[in-house]
Amino acid sequence: MTLSAIVTVPPDLAPADFTAPIAGEPALVRAVRAVRGLAPVYVAAAEGLADAAAECLAAHGLSDVAIVAPSDWPCDGDAVLVHDVRYPLAPAELAARVAAGLAEHDVVVPVLPMTDSVKTIAAHGIVLGNVDRSELVTAQFPRGFTAAALARFPRTDDLAALTSSDLRVGTVDGDPNAFAVDLTQDRGLLEAIVRAD
């Protein structure tokens, strides 16, 4: 199986969100390096963010990574790893598990068991009770797609549509550090985690 990888930069981010260092490396660089060992990487960034993304990558020795428009994702092989810059601490080992899962599935999503307490509430915020967490998970990135699956479901965050289709959707063990962050507000937390590892 031949892979390509895409790192997405959401259009609502400011350039500083993904180019400012987190313990020495920007979120964009961390996301690219998480998948770079497995496949050629493209960064999907809107026109207003593309120059900042290219400059950031070049400053960290990654000038060979191409910037593409969000609507123009390339697929150079049988499958694609899709990563999100808002998951900057997802490790390369997680990307490797996702890629391996594509041997048996059309879509692979890394997940972790839900550990937070989840409640149901009624009007005015009245707590009705606990939700059984045994069937709940948190979904992470990077995610894997066969080329055919990605062509049918280009919205890689729409898990409901994926699981209700005839695609073979599988999961692999996630990673505690592969959580979504607010790149503006969570920078201090991210730096503390990186320095503690």
Image (cartoon, helix red, strand yellow):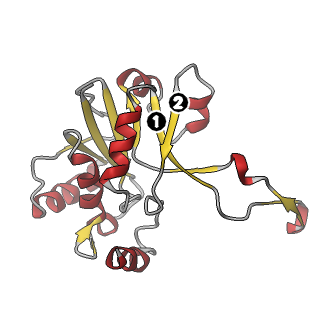
The picture quadrant where one finds residue 78 is top left
Residue drawn at 29 percent across, 33 percent down? 72
Cβ atoms at labels 1 and 2 below 8 Å apart? yes
The picture quadrant where one finds residue 87 is bottom left
In the displayed structure, does residue 73 sit left or right of residue 124?
left
Quadrant the N terminus occupies: top left
Q: Residue 108: which numbered mark, if any?
A: 1
Q: Residue 143: which numbered mark, if any?
A: none
Residue drawn at 37 percent across, 62 percent down? 89
Element marked by disc 1? strand
Q: Amino acid at mark 2?
A: Val
Q: Which residue is mark 2?
A: 169
* Viewer-nearest residue: 23 or 134: 134
Which comes sooner in the sequence, label 1 or label 2?
1
Q: Is residue 72 above or below residue 147?
A: below
The number of numbered discs placed on residues in the rendered structure image is: 2
Per the model, the C-alpha gap separating discs 1 and 2 is 6 Å
Percent of width and height locating residue 168? 52, 24
Q: Amino acid at mark 1?
A: Val
- Residue 187 in view (yes/no): yes
Percent of width and height locating residue 27? 31, 63
Q: Is residue 101 above or below residue 183?
A: above
Percent of width and height locating residue 125? 85, 67
Element marked by disc 2? strand
Label 2 neighbourhood size at 10 Å, few (<14), some (14-19), many (20+)? many
Label 1 neighbourhood size at 10 Å, few (<14), some (14-19), many (20+)? many
